[in-house]
Image (spheres, grey):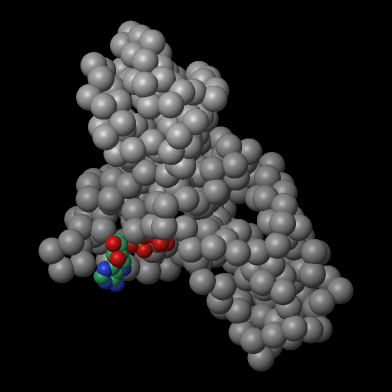
Amino acid sequence: MTIVYMKDIVKRYGSFRALDHVDLEIEEGTILGLLGPNGAGKTTLIHSLAGLIKIDSGEIYLFGKKLNENIMELKRQIGLVTQEVTVFEDLTARENLEFFGGIYGLRGAELKQRVNETLSFVGLTDKAKSLPTKFSGGMKRRLNIACALVHRPKLLIMDEPTVGIDPQSRNYILDSVRKLQQQGTTILYTTHYMEEVQTIASQIAIMDRGHVIAKGTLDELIENIQHEERIELEVVNEPTSELLVELENLNGVKQVTQDSKNIQVVSSGGAENVDNVLEIIKKAGGVRSVSAKKLTLEDVFLTLTGKTLRDGEED
Ligand SMILES: Nc1ncnc2c1ncn2[C@@H]1O[C@H](COP(=O)(O)OP(=O)(O)OP(=O)(O)O)[C@@H](O)[C@H]1O
Ligand SMILES: [Mg+2]
């Protein structure tokens, strides 16, 4: 079953299109990893999906039903973990969960049971009576996730849930996401961290400038850029801008990136530029090492967007 169906979504702020004809589908039981640099439109996409903002045009179906016609019913089946942690600081962990469970209509023994289960699921049972003000960033995030899970949503939407938290909580969260998937929950997981997407996502969507520019499994995405030739070099002397321009001007070169003495040259397939590149570098002082690198999600991202995901990352 298709859990999320977004077709031709446009969301404007003034004349700026934060979502510019976005299409996205998520099948039941999938963890879709949504990757994109700052400002790509990830949060806007999530907010339109959760019915928090009104789109200008396009269609959204959740669980096969049109969102704007069934909004209350559909919202009940969604859990949203927002980009900013939102918990009540003056309520204990347990009271936070009771509050959110109550919003979703849980009462009495059922509420109590769900609260206990969810506290245990996020590893906060022994902190049930503590106020979040005493929590680390990671613990607050886990409580925040628990609040989104207490009503057992069929679709869990997480907006960069692991930014700026300790590795232990991060692993805990990733494990929890996997467990939820095994229990049948469909998950939309947004992140800047490619390793996370590589390890947990069954499908990956890459967003840039309001567009979903690629979607598939990791292997499929890599397959699509495999026709390229990648040369990585460590050079003796810090490259000058003239040298980089000379590399860029070689036949078939699509992209040259440089980080101090490391250079990456991407050419179209069949360009066979290794000799040409080496010749240029040798004139400029020589090469320490050369390699043809195994392609990763980072390469897919760089090829598609011309940016690294770390650009503009805040933490
Ligand atoms: N309320 C708003 N008014 C005007 N512009 C907005 C508003 N909300 C978002 N934008 C703009 O829309 C674009 C997409 O923003 P969005 O928050 O969806 O990006 P994002 O991919 O979630 O980025 P980040 O990784 O920083 O969270 C950005 O250029 C942003 O400045
Ligand atoms: Mg965002």
Identify whether 37 is placed above or below 263: below
Residue 153's place in the image compared with 26, above or below, is below
Q: Residue at x 15, y 68 (%)?
A: 14
Q: Quadrant of residue 116?
A: bottom right
Position of 265 with respect to 154 (left or right) is left
Q: State left or right for residue 53 relative to residue 183.
A: left
The percent position of residue 70, horizontal first and vertical second, equals: 37, 61
User: For the view shown, which residue lies furthest in the right direction?
Assistant: 126
Q: Quadrant of residue 95?
A: bottom right
- Decide if residue 125 is in sight here: yes
Estimate the x, y position of residue 195 in percent, counting from the top left.
Answer: 59, 42
In this view, the residue in front, 140 or 279, is 279
Judging depth in this view, the residue of 282 and 78 nearest the camera is 282
Quarter of the rendered image showing ligand 1: bottom left
Determine the residue positioned at 49% across, 23% down: 287
Image spot of residue 123 (x, y percent): 80, 64
Question: On the rendered image, what quadrant is the C terminus found in?
Answer: bottom right
- Whether residue 79 is visible: no
Residue farthest left in this picture = 15
Residue 102 is situated, as x and y percent measured from the top left of the image, at: 62, 79
| Left/right of residue 306 with respect to residue 157 in the rendered view | left
Q: Nearer the viewer, residue 148 or 247?
A: 247
Residue at 22%, 50% (x, y): give it. 20
Quadrant for residue 88, please give it.
bottom right
- Of 249 and 44, the residue lying toward us: 249
Tally of numbered tags: 0
Q: Is residue 140 left or right of residue 124?
A: left
Looking at the image, which residue is at 13% across and 64% down? 15
